[in-house]
Image (cartoon, rainbow, N blue to C red):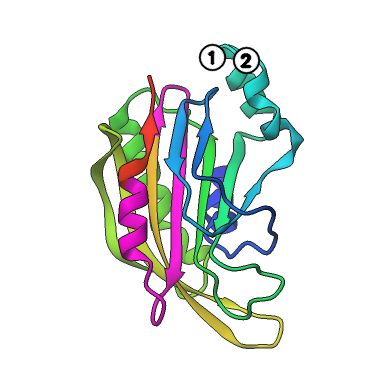
Amino acid sequence: MKKILTFWGLYLALATSTGLMAQEVFQNEQYGFSMTSPEGWQVQQEEDILKNLDKYDFDEEQLQELLAKRNGSIPLISFFKYDPKTHAGLIPTIQILVRSNPTPSFEYFEQMINQSAGDLKNVLEDFTLIESPRVVEVSGQPAIFLTGTYSLGTKRGAKLYARTRVYAVPKGAYFFQIAFIDAQEGEDCSELFDALLQSIQISD
């Protein structure tokens, strides 16, 4: 469970790096995931191995091995509404991660996510659950959804107050972790996040 908590703490924090402008659709054929890219947002794909992943025909066992070698976690892509190098303050962010799923059924998967969510207060400052984890559907598949708020300290001693919506979607030996992050007050990206969630396609 320690690795799961490490994930929560890392991927609910604000990212600080950026890349090229987002394309119309993000698609990863190996893991069977696609989502409409938010128009005009910055995009960062993690490491050369991800950029080259679709060039090879990995089977399920090889994909699991790849996850194992990366400590059970592969960040697929991150989107940022603004360039972190030039924009001060909280930046609305979307982060998509593939995680190893050690559970044998959805019931046990739900228990794992519930336990991890309950411990978030020990990882993130001022973390408060707005909605406790519940079962929803993403791309027609059962998933776990939760939403909460937390704060982040800046180097100048200020605090940023973030809100996150997280979806955990199991797919066999791994699961997708999709985090939509915006501000508690001020810029509200809920309408965009709802539309992007509906665009997600997860193949069998």
Please rate how many residues cluster around mark 2, counting C-alpha atoms within 10 Å: few if below 14, some from 14 to 19, many from 20.
few
Q: Residue at x 55, y 22 (%)?
A: 30
* Residue toward you, 14 or 44: 44
Give the SS element for disc 1.
Answer: helix
Asked whether 51 or 160 is in front, the reply is 51
Say which amino acid is labelled 1.
Glu
* Quadrant (top left/top right/bottom left/bottom right) for the C terminus: top left
Q: Is residue 161 above or below residue 17?
A: below
**Residue 195 inside the magenta-drawn segment:** yes
What kind of residue is marked 2?
Gln
In the image, residue 199 above or below residue 68: below
**Contact flag, marks 2 and 1 (Cβ < 8 Å):** yes
- Label 2 and label 1: CA atoms lie apart by 5 Å
Residue 73 coordinates in the image, percent (x, y)? 60, 37
* Residue 88 picture location, percent across and down: 63, 80
Magenta span of residues: 170-197
Compared with residue 115, is residue 137 higher up or lower down, i.e. above or below? above
Please check the rendered image and state whether residue 5 is part of the magenta-colored stretch, yes or no. Answer: no
Residue 80 x %, y %: 56, 61
| Point 68% across, 64% down: residue | 16
Residue at the extreme bottom: 157
**Relative side of 34 to 22, left or right:** left
Residue named by callout 2: 62
Residue placed furthest toward the right: 48
* Residue at the image point whose x is 66% and y is 88% from the top: 157
Q: Which mark is residue 154?
A: none
Residue 60 is marked as 1
- Point 45% across, 53% down: residue: 179
Q: Residues within 10 Å of mark 1 (few under 14, many from 20)?
A: few
100 on left or right of 167: right
Query: Eyeballing the image, is 82 above or below 63?
Result: below
